[in-house]
Image: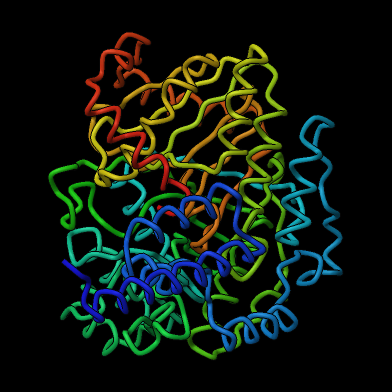
Amino acid sequence: MSETPWTVLLFTSDLLLKIFMIFVVLLQRKKTPSAKLAWILLLVALPFVGSAIYLLVGTTRLGALRRKRHKEILKVIPSGYASHCPDEGHAPTCVVHEYQPIASIAEAVGASAVIGGNIADLFGDSEKMIDSLTKDIDESTSHCHVLSYIMLDDLAGEKVANALSKAASRGIHCRLLLDAVGSKDFLRSTTCKKLNESGVRITQALPANILRATLVRLDLRNHRKIAVIDNAIGYVGSQNIAEPSFALKPKFAPWIDASVRLVGPAVRELQAVFVQDWFMDSDENLSSLLQEPVETVEGGFPVQFMATGPNSNNQALPDLLQTAFHSAREELIITTPYFAPDTSTESALRITANRGVDTHLVLPARNDSLLVAAASRSRFARLMDAGVHIHEFHGGLLHAKTMTIDKSLALIGSANLDRRSLELNFEISMLAYDSDFASHLRFLQQSYIDRSTLLADKTVTDWTIGRRLWQHAVGLIAPIL
């Protein structure tokens, strides 16, 4: 039977579109070869639909206006500590020789130097972290700044909302910056309306609507979790403003997080990130807050922040992680809910284990993302062959994003080990160059390991052929997940 003209037209149109889109993908400067290959596979496999998906989410289109505005904001509100407090006399702190490359990369990308004189409290309990935050808001004397990817209208959200409302009634300047997608339900809630009425300034980060999709990639999100109280107390980590029961996905509960309460001059770096993000979406310039005097805590330790996102070098976090892996001499422990890194980061992890470093990766046994879980498991055999110990956590969804090296360097923040965090989202990571803090975090990581199952080689090799086919098929498109 001969083909109809419409069939020929559709086939020819799809073929020409695929060829054009493949050229577009190949010419992308910031995409890795593995990401390009994954997109080409998707374009070939899905007629027309693959091209539509690429146009929607295939590029890191922040939008020309936002990029221009961000550059202007950085001129007015630089990230570097010395720019805020040039006369304070707090010279950037040196770190031990083996960690200097890590500090240099973080400073080169984020313009944030290593700053000494800080103390920190580590929270592995979400309820205690929320209680501590609300207590600090209750005792605030000047301002309360909170940035969160997700805020829910649950008990945790109610506690923070009530504390902010009461603070605003005392004349405290309260500002709440919430991601427009992650917190969309809260932003429509009665609680949010009451907060507005009480005098709390609420702004949506990265507003999203279908009309913006032609200009901006809508799934580029502000995934940071930050709080700054009175320019003196800072919070950072993986904790959203939500109960561990996490009403959005309760069947994976409890969600296990790790966060830090920080006091010291490095809080000013955290404040600078909030001020930049707030200015971007509210048009209110709070840079005068960054000029206030800073106090160093006696006996405190060095801290460094690195803010990453699609408006800066989006390979910064992978570069930092790879450098950190190579610096490990005895032990490396990583916890993350989502593990689908780029090829270079995975290779660096395998090389670390092959060098004889005791390398551990702790992941949730049940993941709320079926695709990311499959992509993660497609890598298990390679990692285990290199000597990486993989632990599957059974106490809920392990949401903590942490890393310790040799019990002397610690990283904690909002970024997962997947492409979304490493290249697309706005994230914040804290490096602590201190053996005491790193040991505390290492102890928390051990509690996760104690509630996990260590995967044996036989477990992976005994997976059914169908299961392995699924995992490796998803693994092919892991770079674009």
**x, y percentage for residue 129?**
36, 49
Q: Which one is in front, 230 or 106? A: 106
Viewer can see residue 178: no
Name the side, left or right, on which 439 lies relative to 98: left
Height in image: 21 above or below 371?
A: below
Snapshot quadrant of residue 459 = top left
Name the side, left or right, on which 274 lies relative to 351: left
**x, y percentage for residue 196?**
29, 87
Q: Which one is in front, 308 or 13? A: 13
Q: Which one is in front, 169 or 414? A: 414
Q: Residue at x 29, y 31 (%)?
A: 469
Viewer can see residue 98: yes
Q: Residue at x 62, y 81 (%)?
A: 67
Height in image: 96 above or below 48?
A: above
Q: Residue at x 23, y 35 (%)?
A: 366
**x, y percentage for residue 188?**
20, 81
Query: From the image, which quarter does the N terminus lie in?
Result: bottom left
Count of picture labels: 0
Q: Residue at x 61, y 44 (%)?
A: 119
**x, y percentage for residue 156?**
24, 58
| Coloration mode | rainbow
- The residue at the far front in this view is 1
Snapshot quadrant of residue 194 = bottom left
Q: Which one is in front, 386 or 412? A: 386
Name the side, left or right, on which 345 lies relative to 17: right
- The residue at the far left in this view is 251
Height in image: 193 above or below 34?
A: below
Snapshot quadrant of residue 9 = bottom left
